[in-house]
Image: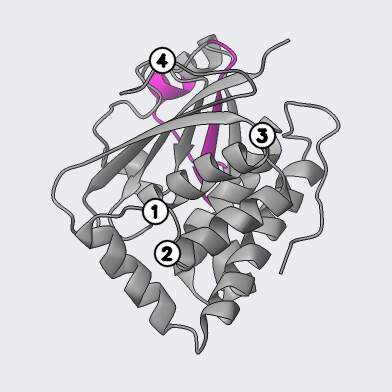
Amino acid sequence: MAVRYNIRMAGVGGQGVVTGSHIFSTGVINAGGESTIVPFYGSEKRMAPVESYVRVSDEPIYEIGEITFPHIIMIFHPQVITHGKSYTNPFYFGLKKDGIALINNDGPMKLEADQDRELKELNARLFYLPATKLSLDVAGIDLATNMAMVGAMGAITGLSNMEALAQAVKDRFLGKGFVVSGGTAALDSVVERKFKKKQELIEKNLAVVQAAWEFAVERDWVQVKGTSAAPAMA
């Protein structure tokens, strides 16, 4: 039976949402799957809304463009929910029945009564991942928050593995096969300056991906049974 997920990623400028979507998409392709991606953002500045639409499957994908009815939504910053910093409001608009929301927060958020009721009507599953905390604890910076979100999503979908994601991370930071905007390139430069060598940058990012993958597996968020954490490739 085919596995297919339409994923809407939402965050704010400076978090590397677009970079994360590229890495996740490439990681699925590296593992033998199929993926298409369309980033969407306005002004390239910190804390401005950013979205990216990613389709992943183990079968051919023929669609591209905005995802209106996602199976999964990824919320990279709590202000997407609390301040409406998104091009899609409410944050769960269009989420399919039994859909998943992966939210970067240290624990469950207090939602508005209407939001809570509507999400329950959808039988939505809310997975709270302390992505920024994992980034700080493992890599020593908050700029690997996107790597944590990627790691958890890799485990949840079961369409990639650590080896495939590791190659995607390496290609991203070694500049292979990625075309980026000026804002994304500037963010990459900021991240790179935090580390003495690119190898250290890659290793730290992979450690965050691994930690988030294991976090998801330990909490039984995996949708494709048999998915497990594999050793990160240095």
| Tag 4 secondary structure | loop
- How far apart are labels 1 and 3 at the CA level? 19 Å
Question: Hey, what amino acid is under mark 2?
Answer: Gly
From the image, tell me which residue sits under label 3.
32
At 58% across and 66% down in the image, what residue appears? 205
The residue drawn where x is 28% and y is 28% is 88
Q: Amino acid at mark 1?
A: Phe
Residue 103 sits above or below residue 111 on the image: below
What is the magenta range?
97-116
In this rendering, the label closer to the viewer, 2 or 4: 2
Q: Where does the image place residue 29, in percent across and percent down from the top left? A: 58, 37
- Marks 2 & 1, CB-CB < 8 Å contact: yes
| Residue annotated with mark 4 | 69
Callout 2: SS: loop
- Give the vertical position of 99 relative to 206 (above or below): above
- The answer to which of marks 1 and 3 sits earlier in the sequence is 3
Asked whether the residues under the numbered discs 1 and 3 touch, taking CB atoms below 8 Å apart as contact, a structural biologist would say no
Element at label 3: loop
Foreground label between 4 and 1: 1
Residue in front for this viewpoint, 175 or 71: 175
Spatial CA distance of label 4 from label 1 is 27 Å
Residue at label 1? 178
Neighbour class for label 3 at 10 Å: few (<14), some, many (≥20)? some
Q: Which residue is mark 2?
A: 175
Residue 59 lies, in percent from the top left, at: 61, 18
Q: Which three-letter amino acid code belongs to the residue tagged 3?
A: Gly
Label 3 vs 4, first from the N-terminus:
3
Asked if one can make out residue 130 in the rendered structure from this viewpoint, the answer is: no
Distance from the alpha carbon under mark 3 to that under mark 4: 25 Å
